[in-house]
Image: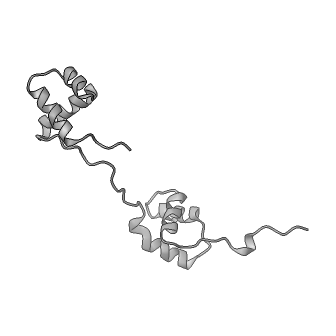
Amino acid sequence: MARPLDFDLRERVVLAVLSGQSRRSVAKAFGVSIASVVRWVQLFRETGSVKPGKMGGHRPFVLADERNWLLHRLEEQPDITMRALADELAERGIVVSHVSVWNLVRREHQTHKKKRAGQRAGSS
């Protein structure tokens, strides 16, 4: 992901526009896009600053509140499938995919292995 242009550049661009120069000429002089100049001036007029907003961030896990329930459920029935857990969560009002359940199980360093009885038969 690209990072925002320097704060100093943004300030100089906005000051040039506020001093009476056209946005197009300022964009050409500073080597930035016209759209950037328009956005920075608009940001300055709305907030009084040209400081860039926060980029990225942390998205909380959907199942963070259900962590204890899921781990307890895996202790009760270690061979339960991720799809079955997702179905049980849906009954509790939390609709998620089996992949979300698997991501939580993996993040908690829980192993989830199939029963040996369910493996293929050997060669004849």
Q: How is the image coloured?
A: one colour
- Quadrant assignment for the C terminus: bottom right
Residue 81 lies, in percent from the top left, at 60, 66
Residue 123 versus residue 7 in the image, above or below: below
Q: Is residue 100 left or right of residue 116?
A: left
Q: Which residue occupies the foreground of this view, 87 or 105?
A: 105
Residue 117 lies, in percent from the top left, at 74, 74
Residue 123 versus residue 39 in the image, above or below: below
Q: Residue furthest right?
A: 124
Q: Is residue 82 left or right of residue 21?
A: right
Where is residue 48, by image quadrant? top left
Residue 15 lies, in percent from the top left, at 11, 32
Where is residue 47, by image quadrant? top left
Q: Is residue 46 left or right of residue 24?
A: left
Q: Is residue 43 left or right of residue 92?
A: left
Where is residue 14, by image quadrant? top left
Q: Which residue occupies the foreground of this view, 13 or 40?
A: 13
| Residue for point 13% across, 26% down | 17
| Residue for point 48% across, 57% down | 96
Count of all numbered marks drawn on residues in the image: 0
| Residue for point 28% across, 42% down | 4
Residue 121 lies, in percent from the top left, at 82, 69
